[in-house]
Amino acid sequence: MDPTETLELLCADAWQPVTGYKLGDWRLRAADGFTGRANSALAVGDPGVPVGEALDRVCEFAHSHAIPPVLQAVVDSATERAVAASGWVPNTRHAAGHLVSVLVGPLGEGSERAEILPGPTASWWELAAGSTEPSPAQRHVLTTGEIGYGVAEITAGAVRAAVVGDVLHIARLAVRPEHRRRGLASALMAACGPWAAERGAARCALQVAVGNEAALKLYAALGFREHHQYRYWVPACEDRSL
């Protein structure tokens, strides 16, 4: 498996669905609709059956879990070309953006303005999940694995840090509007570094929609570069609400 597919699998391990099924190397995932990554099929490697048959299995799995069929494929890969040839189309209605950049960069060196907690607080949940009372699916996806819960100035910002293998996976970075432009996002990123290094991480990876210019500017300033992109696909006849 090539480095792009390996990184995709590590990122997937850092973001566990409620229900998962392996179709060869492909991963079929469901989490009650919480995030595209946890409710799509990750199409990397060999599904063990012809792509057309694999896509039928993706649809069957999605329907059995009451979610729309969605597939995640690396841009310009042979798999993506086969998916397009099978009649699937880019999921341009995906709310968070159907085209995503996977960035890699260095571990931060720590910050006195942010800390990593061993468990989520109410304010962390509010920032990371949008509610102080997360759903069971949100709890599962956001707390499964080797997770650190980063906070800045206790209630001003939050981030999810997950370590899988030698990778620190960053997600759900958020700063309250009234606290922005004060360097807290950078502080949160920096605070994750020492915590992750203690757990074996040597590099950092994250996923951000290509249209999120503010986030891309922040990560570029922190030394991140694009490793590859992936795109969400759906059958042309399906609802595309995810």
Image: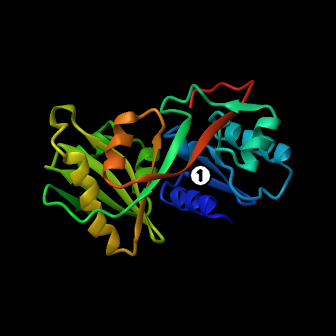
Front residue of 68/191: it is: 191
Query: Image height check: is 71 above or below 166?
Result: above
The residue lying at 69 percent from left, 33 percent from top is: 234
The residue lying at 54 percent from left, 56 percent from top is: 12
- The residue where tag 1 is placed is 19
Question: In the image, 154: left or right of 76?
Answer: left
Question: In the image, 8: left or right of 184?
Answer: right
Residue 31 in sight in this render: no
Question: In the image, 135: left or right of 19?
Answer: left
Q: Quadrant of residue 194?
A: bottom left
Q: Secondary structure at mark 1?
A: strand
Residue 239 in sight in this render: yes
The residue lying at 24 percent from left, 50 percent from top is: 186
Q: Amino acid under label 1?
A: Thr
Q: Which percent across, then down, holds residue 45?
A: 72, 58
Front residue of 12/138: it is: 12
Q: Which percent across, then down, holds residue 227?
A: 52, 54
Query: Image height check: is 145 above or below 181?
Result: below
